[in-house]
Each structure stands twice: as C-alpha cells, then as structure tokens.
C-alpha cells in the first residue's frame, strides 16, 4: 500500500469495477439484519465506503473480514474504521483463496458489483462446504434467476448449481435512487442458507459440465443437447432426455450425472 494520507472524503465510484455505492442506511441495516442470528464469521465483499460495514461492526459477536479491490476504498475504510484495519483484504475476490480467510465456515454479505455477481456465485458453489450463508444484493433479474424453480423461464445454470446446496429466499427489491451513481435497473436482495447435510453424490466437475451443456442449448430436448454424453439408459434417463433443461430439477441433473459413462 503506498504511503499517503488517509482521507474521509467520499470514494469516487469507478465504472470499470461496476461500483454503485448504496447510501440508504435503513436498507443497509435491513441487509445486515438478514444474517442468521447464529452467524459468527462474516466476509463482506466490496465494502466500498462501509455502508454495510458500519452495522456489521456493531455486532461484537461477529468476526468480520472485508475484501476490497479498490485502493481508494481501502484507504477510506482504514481511516474511518480503524478497528477494521487488520481485517481488510486488499484483493480481487475472484482470486481470493477462500480456505485461508477463516479457520472455520463463514457467511458472505455484500452489495455485489453487477459485472462479477454471477462469478461470485460460481465461487460460492465451488466452496459450498465452507460457506454457510449468503446475504447479497444483485441486479433484480439475477436475484430472481438464482432462486427460480424448475419450469420457470428464469431458471438456468446458476439456479441448478446454487439450489443443489442452498435454500434461497428473495427478501426485497431496492430502488435505483438509493445508489451513487444510480444503476439502470432495480436491485434485489436474496438470502441463501446451506441445506443441512447437502452433498453431491457424483463428480462436481461432471455435474457442472453437464448442467452448463444442457442450458447452453436450452431450446433443444436433452437427447440432442447432451448428445456428447454417453449415459446408462434406464427408464428414468430416457424420460429425462425427452425434456428440456429448464424442466429438470437439480435432483434430475444429479441423476443424469450419476448415469454418465463418459464424454464422447
């Protein structure tokens, strides 16, 4: 970190990082209040000027760490929240080693930049064994997609992957006017809670590959979309292959992956 004076001036939102700073304290408090009462360890992603951070710090039972890629924000946070100085990770969350943050499982919270929100969720899926809960703000369309049930037009790759391990709940919608600068769309806050004893009884890589392939050709029936996958054909597999990707639950995709012999 370069040697320079800390400042309490506002941080300039940077378009290339997709920054839209929330400035409504009531909404911020509502987001923080959505964490489960038993939460003990929290990673905040993209704290910016600390609109959520200030309320997280009011919870003495929480071990809080924040990850921030914007040096200007890091300087602001160190000046305005000196008690947080040793808990700031100056890093890109997409490159961060989640296993090194806490010694045990933890929750994630944040007003996530729209341009990396889906990538954050893929990382949550990859590390689901350590992440017990997520409370986050997304573009409203993305928020609904994550928790959409099978059969919905919004149901997709992230829906299947996340719902395999998490119970999702859409909490509330946030107006564009409470951000600086205002985004072009509304935002939505969701909560994901890890399902007790949720496990994937097949290869994670194969499961992910099959789900992505199925939805990349979502207008085709699965017999055609998954033609490069050699499956053990029983009655259930035959029935599933007559459907389209959005018609299958995550359990159906697990069944297909478990029936996989090899990629052709």
Image (cartoon, rainbow, N blue to C red):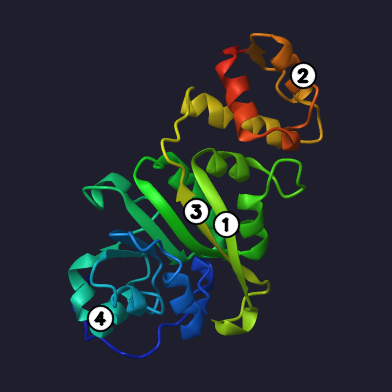
Q: Secondary structure at mark 1?
A: strand
In three-dimensional space, the C-alpha distance between marks 1 and 3, rounded to whole angstroms, equals 7 Å
Q: Is residue 166 left or right of residue 107?
A: right
Taking depth in this image into account, of 23 and 119 the one nearest to the observer is 23
Q: Residue tagged by mark 3? A: 192
Q: Is residue 251 above or below residue 177?
A: above
Q: Residue tagged by mark 4? A: 81
First-in-chain label (4 vs 1): 4
First-in-chain label (2 vs 3): 3
In three-dimensional space, the C-alpha distance between marks 4 and 1, rounded to whole angstroms, equals 31 Å
Q: Secondary structure at mark 4?
A: loop
First-in-chain label (1 vs 3): 1
In three-dimensional space, the C-alpha distance between marks 2 and 4, rounded to whole angstroms, equals 58 Å
The residue sitting at 37% across, 50% down in the picture is 95
* Marks 4, 1: nearer the viewer: 1
Q: Is there CB contact under 8 Å for labels 1 and 3?
A: yes
Taking depth in this image into account, of 74 and 176 the one nearest to the observer is 176
Taking depth in this image into account, of 169 and 24 the one nearest to the observer is 169
Whole-percent x, y for residue 187 in the image: 61, 69
Q: Residue tagged by mark 2? A: 239
Q: Is there CB contact under 8 Å for labels 4 and 3?
A: no
Circle 1 crowding by C-alpha within 10 Å: few under 14, some 14–19, many from 20: some
Taking depth in this image into account, of 102 and 5 the one nearest to the observer is 102
């Amino acid at each position: 970190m370069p040697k320079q004076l800390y400042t309490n001036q506002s941080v300039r939102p940077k378009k290339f990082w997709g920054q839209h700073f929330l400035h409504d304290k009531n909404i911020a408090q509502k987001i923080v209040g959505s964490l489960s009462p038993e939460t003990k360890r929290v990673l905040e992603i993209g704290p910016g000027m600390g609109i959520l951070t200030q309320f997280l710090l009011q919870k003495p039972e929480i071990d809080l760490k924040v990850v921030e890629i914007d040096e200007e924000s890091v300087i602001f946070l160190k000046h305005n929240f000196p008690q947080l100085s040793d808990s700031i990770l100056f890093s890109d969350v997409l490159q961060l080693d989640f296993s090194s943050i806490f010694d045990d499982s933890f929750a994630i919270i944040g007003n996530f930049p729209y341009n990396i929100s889906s990538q954050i969720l893929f990382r949550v899926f990859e590390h689901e064994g350590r992440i017990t809960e997520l409370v986050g703000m997304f573009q409203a369309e993305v928020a609904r997609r994550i928790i959409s049930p099978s059969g919905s037009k919004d149901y997709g790759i992230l829906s299947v992957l996340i719902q395999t391990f998490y119970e999702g709940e859409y909490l509330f919608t946030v107006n564009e006017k409470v951000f600086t600068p205002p985004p072009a769309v509304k935002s939505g806050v969701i909560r994901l809670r890890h399902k007790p004893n949720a496990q994937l009884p097949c290869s994670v890589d194969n499961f992910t590959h099959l789900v992505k392939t199925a939805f990349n050709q979502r207008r085709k029936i699965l017999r055609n979309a998954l033609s490069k996958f050699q499956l053990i054909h029983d009655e259930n597999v035959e029935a599933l292959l007559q459907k389209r990707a959005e018609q299958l639950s995550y359990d159906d995709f697990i069944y297909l992956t478990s029936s996989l012999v090899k990629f052709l």
